[in-house]
Amino acid sequence: MARDPDYGAFVDKFVLELTSSAHDQPLQGLTFAVKDIFDMEGYVTGFGHPDWARTHSAATSTAPAVLAVLRGGATCVGRTVMDEMAYSIDGENIHYGTPVNPCAPDRVPGGSSSGSAVAVGAKIVDFSLGTDTGGSVRVPASYCGILGFRPSYDAVPSAGVVPLAQSFDTVGWFARDPVILSRVGHILLQSPVMDPIKPSQVIIAEDCFQLSNIPNDRLGQVLVKSVEKIYGGHILKHTVLGDYVKEKVPSLEHFTSKDIKELENNIPSLAALSNAMRSLERYEFKDNHGEWITTVKPELGPGISERVWEAVRTTGENVDACHSVKTELHAALATLLQNFGVLAIPTVPGPPPKLQADPATLEIFRAKAFSLLSIAGVSGFCQVSMPLGMHDNLPVAVSLLAKQGSDAFLLNVVESLYGTLKEQVEITEK
């Protein structure tokens, strides 16, 4: 399988722990890895590119998120490979090599938190830290067959993290075990451990499940049967999310182009949502890094290069409309879910693409992926990607979203459902 015992996941390996006499160390004995986007005192933050590392000096302090898990008793074993400047969901890096997907070595691992996901998927560490702006925790989690959590916007401090686009950046984390996912979450979110609350409703976004090329009996139905078993079928509801979003988010009209209406197999309102998100992301990326890009002119890999230069050339028109879309979507989804409702969608529209896939094919897949990923991205709601085993030898995943600030509740739901989901996958595979 992988020649490298570390699956190419690391840019730097070391052992770092804090000596503490504190009794309350819920992460004692656990190991973790950190994406090369977080500042750690004494280390140069590489941001996925050797030119970035070359033009920046070592960090003088450690990002609060990293400090929090160190104080929780965990041991850091290294910094992980990421996509250049975090501007991709594929996981390929022409400079540092592409970490090997432990589930499917001929497929991309997903990015931009590629090495962090691979380190967990390959059982090198117990958990890892990543970031998620457009999908950079949720996508690699789904491709590597592990759990990935994108918290509510602003729920975990992003100080000491190189920004991509501040309107959407979040600090997320990966684990194989739902109990560890929760434990890490409680430390990062600084939330007390609470008694599980049963979801008031689990809403299945029917149109989103139709976007996926995984047969529904291996995707939506696995979740439906698990929810019925754990909570009872009366809490299941079904909706056509695209229609609801179209009606409730009028500012999307600024982002609905002729091309969108003709897009095969896409949901027009969610494609417009993705357009709005990517438009603001480009503008903020340029604001953060445009000057560095034009001065240093770094060599960038295929796909990323085009995206980065498109961002550098962006004019920032429609920025106000983007912010209106954010406000409207947040309100619309809060109304839909209420306090303890959960929305279910596929994490991505299918299995991980092949390594070095044709860019044109990838673009179609990316467009569908961002229609799904931008729901949490734009609303600021929390989302967890959960593995549903393998279909045709490739990993499958489903996602649950909950209202902004309901992170501890969502982590509890994962713990309650996870075992039954695994059983249901086994029954279906027989």
Image: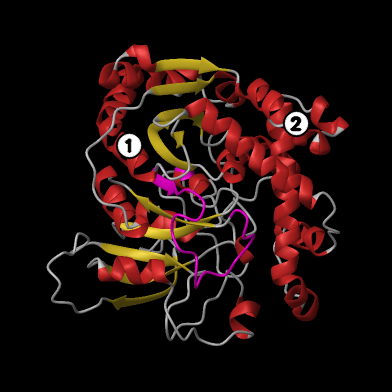
Identify the element where label 2 is drawn: helix
Magenta highlight range: 142-168
Q: Position of residue 178 (x, y in %)?
A: 28, 43
Q: Is residue 101 above or below residue 73?
A: above
Between circles 1 and 2, the one closer to the viewer is 2
Q: Position of residue 294 (x, y in %)?
A: 80, 75
Mark 1 and mark 2: Cα distance apart in space? 33 Å
Could you say which quadrant of the image residue 67 lies in?
bottom left
At 22% from the left and 38% from the top, the residue drawn is 195
Q: How many marks?
A: 2
Q: Is residue 53 above or below residue 7?
A: below
Q: Which mark is residue 250?
A: 2
Q: Is residue 425 left or right of residue 112?
A: left
The crowding category of the residue bearing disc 2, from other C-alpha atoms within 10 Å (few below 14, some 14 to 19, many at least 20), is some
The crowding category of the residue bearing disc 1, from other C-alpha atoms within 10 Å (few below 14, some 14 to 19, many at least 20), is many
Q: Position of residue 77 (x, y in %)?
A: 32, 71
Q: Is residue 137 left or right of residue 207?
A: left
Toward the viewer: 87 or 39?
A: 39
At 51% from the left and 42% from the top, the residue drawn is 381
Question: Of helix, strand and loop, which mostly describes the magenta segment?
Answer: loop
The disc labelled 1 sits on which kind of residue?
Val
Identify the element where label 1 is drawn: helix
The disc labelled 2 sits on which kind of residue?
Pro
The colour mode here is secondary structure
Toward the viewer: 113 or 157?
A: 157
Q: Is residue 303 above or below residue 271?
A: below
Q: Position of residue 167 (x, y in %)?
A: 63, 55
Residue 122 visible, this orientation:
no
At 29% from the left and 33% from the top, the residue drawn is 418
Q: Which mark is residue 414?
A: 1
Q: Specify the quadrant that holds the C terminus.
A: top left
